[in-house]
Image: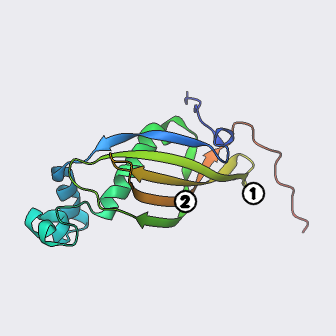
Amino acid sequence: MARTPDICWEDLVPGTTRELGSVTTTAEAMIAFAQQFDPQSFHVDEKAGQESIFGGLCASGWFTCSVAMRLLVDNLFKYSSYMGSPGTESIKWLKPVYPGDTLSLRFTVLDSRPLRRRSDVGMVHATYDLFNQEGAKVLEVENYIMLGRRHPGPPPAEQAG
């Protein structure tokens, strides 16, 4: 029997914020990710990083997005009726992420509405912001997520043919 999710669409009210945990980065994880997916020199080589505009080895922006995604899944989505995302409005990499940085995720609901064609699904427009240990925002993502509704509305009206 499937477990009833703790968090449904109705629980993500516009204006609410959730702190979704933190993780400390390592050079090994950053390099392994970059070697496979983003092998730019300043992501895979300490010396090249030191000689770059970043002044040291720094994480790929996609690594940073992956850290945020992991925190979302571990601390929100796996406890919810999450059904996926139709897309992202924007991704902004605001500051470099370095080995040893501790990154914390904040999820803020901007807007919410039921889907017109699926009375059992709601859409949430949200931002998630990742901050380093000094409180500096390193990543800002604005996107949409779909969640099951705890109390689905009436079925959509049949269209006249």
Residue name at image x 31 percent, y 42 percent: 23
Q: Do the residues labelled 1 and 2 touch (CB within 8 Å)?
A: no
In x, y percent, where is residue 76?
50, 40
Callout count: 2
Can you say whether 36 is above or below 73 in the image?
below
- Residue identifier under label 1: 117
Left or right of 3, for residue 39: left
- In the picture as drawn, the residue positioned furthest to the right comes out as 160
Can you say whether 101 is above or below 2 in the image?
below
Instruction: Point out which mark residue 143 bears.
Output: 2
Distance between the alpha carbons at the discs numbered 1 and 2: 20 Å
The crowding category of the residue bearing disc 2, from other C-alpha atoms within 10 Å (few below 14, some 14 to 19, many at least 20), is some
Residue name at image x 16 percent, y 71 percent: 41
The kind of residue on which mark 1 rests is Arg
The kind of residue on which mark 2 rests is Asn
- Judging from the image, the colouring scheme is rainbow
